[in-house]
Image (cartoon, rainbow, N blue to C red):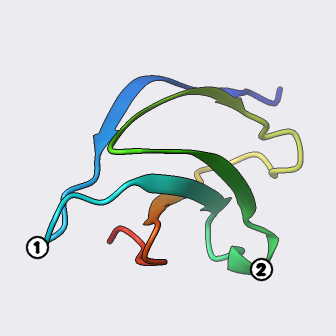
Amino acid sequence: MKKVIFITGLTWLCAFANAQSNINQYEYWFDSDFTNRVTTNVSPSQLFTLNSAVNTANLNNGLHTFHIRFRDEDLNFSP
């Protein structure tokens, strides 16, 4: 049976060394499938709360790795 991962109540504060930056995009992918990542633009904000369901219907049964990163207005990605 396929399951859906719920990301709820995650609050992300983007703090970079030089100054506060605004998050304007996030993207996620499973395992090493970076080429099929899902990218979503968001309204620029220093404080961003992600509350979303992630579709896992195309994944095979088994253990997988979920990757997510955030981008700021200077086009820098979170680690």
Depth check: 22 or 28 in front? Answer: 22
Disc assigned to residue 17:
1
Mark 2 neighbour density, 10 Å: few (under 14) some (14–19) many (20 or more): few
Judge whether 69 appears above or below 1 on screen.
below
Left or right of 17? Residue 50 is right
Judge whether 25 appears above or below 35 on screen.
above
Q: Residue furthest left?
A: 17
Q: Position of residue 37 (x, y in %)?
A: 73, 66
Judge whether 35 appears above or below 67 on screen.
below
- Mark 1: which amino acid? Ala
Left or right of 2? Residue 5 is left
Judged from the image, the secondary structure of the residue bearing numbered disc 1 is loop
Judged from the image, the secondary structure of the residue bearing numbered disc 2 is helix
Left or right of 42? Residue 68 is left
**Location of the C terminus (image quadrant):** bottom left
Say which quarter of the image contains residue 22: bottom left
Q: CA distance from mark 2 to mark 1?
A: 29 Å
Rendered residue at 81%/70% (across/down): 36
Depth check: 36 or 4 in front? Answer: 36
Q: Is residue 25 visible?
A: yes
Mark 1 neighbour density, 10 Å: few (under 14) some (14–19) many (20 or more): few
Q: Position of residue 63 (x, y in %)?
A: 58, 51
Which residue is labeled 2 in the image? Answer: 35
Q: Position of residue 23 (x, y in %)?
A: 44, 53
Question: How many numbered circles does the render carry?
Answer: 2
